[in-house]
Amino acid sequence: MADKKTTFTENDMQHEVNKRAKTAGIDINIEDTGKVLDLFEEVATERLVAGEIVKMRNFGSFEVKDQKARNRYNPATKQTEMFPATKLPKFDASDVLKDKVVA
């Protein structure tokens, strides 16, 4: 039986970043920590929508990839359906992150 995975939520991230900021001597309250995380998400999303790659050293990069239109078979209807071309966000982990996860 596989180990059950837990979920680290946005709220968990907010509290952990706030705790570590205080440990590092950065005086920030929990609400402002949440605002900073929201701003990060907003800026990264805007850059991705603009077609840019968002790179974070030692973490990885985010980019939007084009997915071609394709035919797929629907076994419920026994019909072939055309799925239109679309864009999908992708994440590529850095070698540093991969090494830390494997260790």
Image: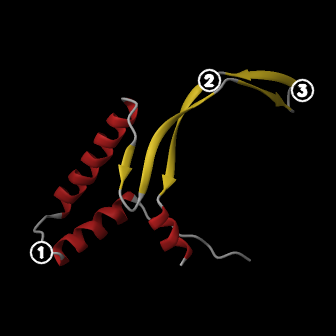
Instruction: Mark 3 and mark 2 in contact? Answer it, CB < 8 Å.
Output: no
Q: CA distance from mark 3 to mark 2?
A: 22 Å
**Horizontal arrangement in the rendering, residue 74 relative to residue 25 (left or right):** right
**Horizontal arrangement in the rendering, residue 6 relative to residue 29 (left or right):** right
**Horizontal arrangement in the rendering, residue 13 relative to residue 62 (left or right):** left
User: Disc 3 designates what residue?
Assistant: 78
Numbered disc in front, either 1 or 3: 1
User: Disc 1 designates what residue?
Assistant: 25
Numbered disc in front, either 3 or 2: 2
Give the label on residue 8, or none. Answer: none
Q: Callout 2: helix, strand or loop?
A: loop
Residue 80 vertical position relative to residue 101 in the rendered view, above or below: above
User: Disc 2 designates what residue?
Assistant: 85
State the image coordinates of residue 98 (x, y, percent, origin top left): 52, 66
Q: Callout 1: helix, strand or loop?
A: loop
Give the residue displayed 51% in from the left and 71% down from the top. Answer: 99
Camera sees residue 7? no
Q: Most extreme residue toward the right, as rendered?
A: 78
Q: Callout 3: helix, strand or loop?
A: loop
